[in-house]
Amino acid sequence: MQVSAQKIVVLGTGGTIAGTAAQAGDNIGYTAAQVGVGELLAAVPGLQALAGGPLVVEQVAQVDSKDMEFGIWHALAQRCAACLDDPAVGGIVITHGTDTIEETAWFLHSVLAADKPVVLTCAMRPATALVPDGPQNLMDAVAVAATEGARGVLVVAAGTIHGAQRVQKVHPYRVDPFNSADAGPLGWVEEGVVRLAHAWPQPARQVHLAAVLHRPADAAWPWVELVVSHAGASGRAVDALVRDGVQGLVVACTGNGTIHQALEAALARAQAVGVRVLRSTRCSEGQLLPKPGDALVAAPGLSPVKARIGLVLELLA
């Protein structure tokens, strides 16, 4: 089930998959984003044959994904939009760090009408590890990108295919650090063949694409911050952010959108002076269910970091 002749574009952004360590046995004391994406692909035998067509390699950025920022997202959105419009391109693979891959995936899902596969992949061990996981993840990502009928923004790691909305990093160091909570993965890659448990995700409407692509690359993005409700929370941080000009706030709520009374009062004050406030939940499974009469808008089905991206894009538009 491979697409022949069409090319697969591989966009590099750095991350642990491109990291190096002084000692081969060191899987945590490495420096991310040291190896170019072209070198990474050249070190994986059989990758070209698996692609079923030409592999085109581009280095978009070279960063540790903890430092991912809007300028790189802007560049990725531009390149992905162009590739999706190119009939010669069958799919896109993006190498990325694990720390913020779920955020980049949701951003791209939100701005692209991905009727072709846009596959983000990564590694938990650096390229210099005794047993690196990056090469197999690259193989699996290319297999997904070359699969007939594949579409949507996806994260592929440790043989598992996740959709952009539900995927979360849930472990700090094991080689299979992601899950999709109670939704479950979309499927798996088994010896280069995709086995689906759910249908490929539907492409999003291109609501925000023009607003992203038509803005200058160095233009400031809306300022949206995260705050967390917890035992003993206060509203002082919210009040300080409002004084400094924050435009939006996403609160990671307890349970089904509940907020400590002191923090909730501060959020109400912020909303009253024009700051956009959005509720998500700290819970990693299920989704927040809004109730009639809620004073603060909810973001059902989105983690706090993904709700923040949605609010940034709304303010941008």
Image: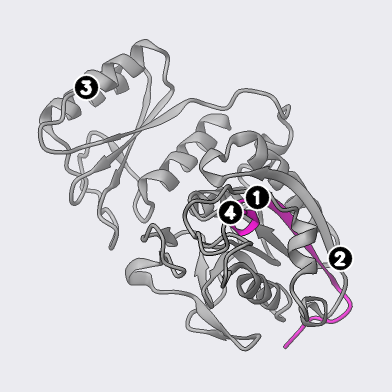
- Choose mark 3 or mark 1, whichever is in front: 1
Report the residue marked by disc 1.
14
Classify 10 Å Cα crowding around label 1: few (below 14), some (14-19), many (20 and above).
Answer: many
Q: CA distance from mark 3 to mark 2?
A: 51 Å
Q: x and y percent of residue 160 in the render?
A: 51, 75
Q: Is residue 91 visible?
A: no
Which residues, given as a range, are shown in magenta?
A: 1-20
Question: Quadrant of the rendered structure where residue 5 is?
Answer: bottom right
Amino acid type, label 3: Ala
Q: Earlier in the sequence, mark 4 or mark 2?
A: 4
Tell whether position 203 is magenta. Answer: no
Q: Residue at x 46, y 37 (%)?
A: 311
Amino acid type, label 2: Pro
Q: Which mark is residue 266?
A: 3
Report the residue marked by disc 2.
87
Would you place residue 310 above or below residue 180 in this image?
above
Q: Which mark is residue 21?
A: 4
Q: CA distance from mark 2 to mark 1?
A: 27 Å
- Choose mark 4 or mark 2, whichever is in front: 4
State which quarter of the image contains the C terminus.
top right
Q: x and y percent of residue 20 in the render?
A: 62, 54
Q: Earlier in the sequence, mark 3 or mark 2?
A: 2
Q: CA distance from mark 4 to mark 3?
A: 46 Å
Q: Is residue 304 left or right of residue 66?
A: left
Q: Residue at x 61, y 67 (%)?
A: 134
Say if mark 1 contacts mark 4, CB within 8 Å.
Answer: no
